[in-house]
Amino acid sequence: MPEQIKEQTKELKVDDIKAAAEEKGCPVQKALYFVNEFLAGPMCGRCFPCMMGSYEARIRLQNLVEGRGSDADVLALGRIAADMVEASFCKKGKDTGRFILDWIATGVYKEHAEGHCPDMQCQALIEYRIIPGKCISCGACKNACKFLAIHGEQGKSYKSGYLPFEIRQLRCTRCGECIKVCPTGAVVLVAAKASEPVGV
Ligand code: SF4
Ligand code: SF4
Ligand code: SF4
């Protein structure tokens, strides 16, 4: 394949990765997806700012997505991305830095450092919970959960004092099946750090 066509193919790949990243709701997830795919594909490793910047950006982004993030990660990402724009040898590295800066500019990175994903997409930062006052003890959520993460007893007219339905957070994989089947809207998605469920 002639050199020029090869280069065009790589350029298209960066655009394709960016388009796929934009389909994710959370701007931190967008950047992590982009950097993972960039490292797996078009990043050629010929210059230090782009190669090391991408690897370090991935670590910082993983920290934010997985609930270990801090303000230091957000600051470092801004510095890494600015260096990539400034010093990368080619457009691919410079574009990567620009994309990361644009995603940081949404303002949600700092919220992730505080343990909150406003798009409710980072699984380490969210929880499914059952609002006791809305639960009619029908058992649909327990039947839908493949991970045995819900305990509770179905209500029976002849019995009182049965076990209320609850989600065991350590077993929950955040698959979301329980929220789909609950007939009363008693299952809600909340920020893991929230003391009260949202939308109550
Ligand atoms: S900026 Fe371009 S040349 Fe440098 S590592 Fe990235 S893709 Fe390769
Ligand atoms: S989100 Fe999935 S794993 Fe968690 S309790 Fe609901 S059904 Fe079970
Ligand atoms: S599906 Fe909803 S109403 Fe039924 S037991 Fe689960 S939380 Fe309660």
Image: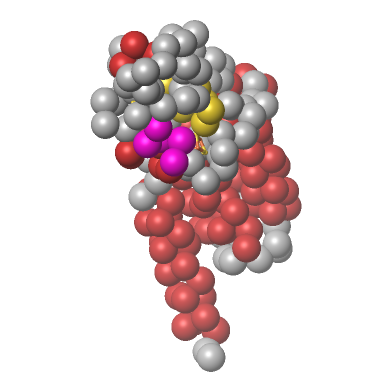
Describe residue 182's horizontal placement relative to residue 102 as left or right: left
Dividing the picture into quadrants, the one containing residue 179 is top left
Q: Is residue 196 visible?
A: yes
The percent coordinates of residue 18 (x first, y second) are 42, 55
Image position of 6 with respect to 148: above or below = below
Furthest residue to the bottom? 1
- Please state the extent of the stretch shown in magenta in the rendering: 139-143
Q: Is residue 122 magenta?
A: no
The percent coordinates of residue 19 (x first, y second) are 37, 56
Image position of 33 with respect to 145: above or below = below
Dividing the picture into quadrants, the one containing residue 89 is bottom right
Image position of 103 with respect to 188: above or below = below
Residue occupying image coordinates x 70% and y 62%: 45
Furthest residue to the front? 158
Secondary structure mostly seen in magenta is helix
Residue occupying image coordinates x 40% and y 56%: 20
The quadrant the C terminus occupies is top left
Residue occupying image coordinates x 56% and y 58%: 37
Please give the count of numbered marks on the rendered protein.
0
Describe residue 7's horizontal placement relative to residue 120 as left or right: right
Q: Is residue 189 visible?
A: no
Which residue is at the front of the view, 124 or 118?
124
Residue occupying image coordinates x 47% and y 16%: 162
The percent coordinates of residue 185 (x first, y second) are 29, 26
Image position of 187 with respect to 163: above or below = below
Which residue is at the front of the view, 141 or 1?
141
